[in-house]
Amino acid sequence: MPETDDVILSNYVQTSRIISLLLTRILGDIEKKLALHQKILLYEKQIDAVAVSEKSLIKKTEIQNTKLAALSLKIKALEDEKKLLQNQIRRLKEIDLNSDKTMGKPGPEGPKAEEFMPKTDNGL
């Protein structure tokens, strides 16, 4: 009977060790699962924060695009005004240059223009 007791006891010890190892693995897997679950929760929070940040950035981008469009319109208006002023300056220069060419040359109204010139009294 001692041999039978030893075999039974030995099987019991071996089975207990196997059960203990399995329980250790199961508990380890549960801990890993909990750790992974915590990581997933953390990543979900980070994703939510990034999504909120993305929405904020989209709104800011839309605002900046609106401002940019307004500024583009202002730039276009200023460029048009610049062209008008440049044309006006060019026309004024042409008028000024043309008047320099005709000044001092008697034209059909040359003698009449002399009437409006101040007279000097050399005889007094």
Image (cartoon, rainbow, N blue to C red):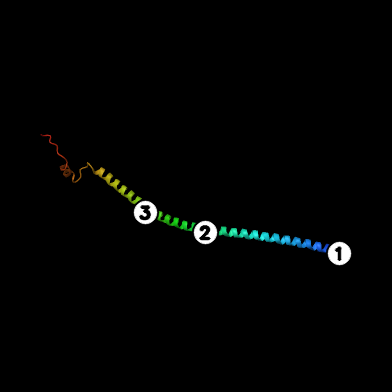
Q: Residue at x 77, y 62 (%)?
A: 18
Q: Name the residue beneath numbered marker 1.
A: 5
In the image, 36 versus 63, the foreground residue is 36
Q: What crowding class fits label 2: few (fewer than 14 Cα within 10 Å), some (14-19), or many (20 or more)?
A: few
**Helix, strand or loop for disc 2:** helix
Neighbour tally class for label 1: few under 14, some 14-19, many 20 plus, Cα within 10 Å? few
Residue 74 screen position, x and y as percent: 38, 53
The quarter of the image holding the C terminus is top left
Is the C-beta separation of discs 2 and 3 under 8 Å? Answer: no
- Please name the residue shown 73% across and 62% down the image: 23
Q: Which residue is mark 3?
A: 77
- 16 relative to 90 in the view: left or right: right
> Picture coordinates of residue 110 (x, y %)?
18, 44
User: What count of labels does the image hold?
Assistant: 3
Q: Nearer the viewer, mark 2 or mark 1?
A: 1
Q: Position of residue 66 (x, y in %)?
A: 43, 57
Q: Earlier in the sequence, mark 2 or mark 3?
A: 2
Identify the residue under disc 2.
52
**Residue 64 appears in which quarter of the rendering?**
bottom left
- Secondary structure of the residue carrying numbered label 1: helix
Q: CA distance from mark 1 to mark 3?
A: 105 Å
